[in-house]
Image (tube, helix red, strand yellow):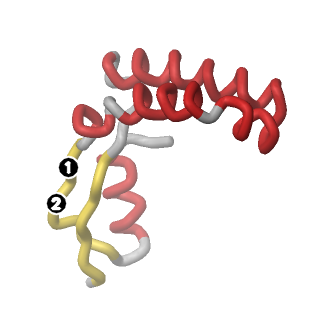
Amino acid sequence: METLETYRRIGERVGLRATKLTDISDQTLPTFAQWRARLESHREEVRALIGEDGLEHFLASCEVLPTLWKQRILGYGLIVAVKE
């Protein structure tokens, strides 16, 4: 996981020129609440698919990730690029 700027530079090294970089972290933050809600309404199906440990790890990520988003440690971004 890198910054948008790092991904822009990586793209340049392989012949891509970024025309737009957009941080969409704020727009994706509600995702984690939706994940938790879906988990709660389908807990047994999820447990059957990924086991109790997997379920607990997923639930923990739903608690930790929003904090990382809000602190701008992690997030989501979009890059539009053209091939040179």
Most foreground residue, 76 or 61: 61
Task: From this view, report whether residue 66 is shown above or below residue 29.
Answer: above
Q: CA distance from mark 2 to mark 1?
A: 6 Å
**Amino acid at pointer 1:** Thr
Label 2 sits on a secondary structure element that is strand
For label 2, count other residues whose C-alpha is less than 10 Å away and answer few (under 14), some (14-19) or many (20+). Answer: few
Determine whether, in the image, residue 24 is placed left or right of residue 43.
left
Q: Residue at x 40, y 68 (%)?
A: 13
Label 1 sits on a secondary structure element that is strand
Q: Label 1 belongs to which residue? A: 22
**Which quarter of the figure has residue 9?**
bottom left
* Quadrant including the C terminus: bottom left
Q: Label 2 belongs to which residue? A: 20
Q: Residue at x 78, y 44 (%)?
A: 49
**Which quarter of the figure has residue 24?**
top left
- Residue 37's tag is none
Contact? badges 2 and 1 (CB < 8 Å): yes
Image spot of residue 39 (x, y percent) = 58, 31
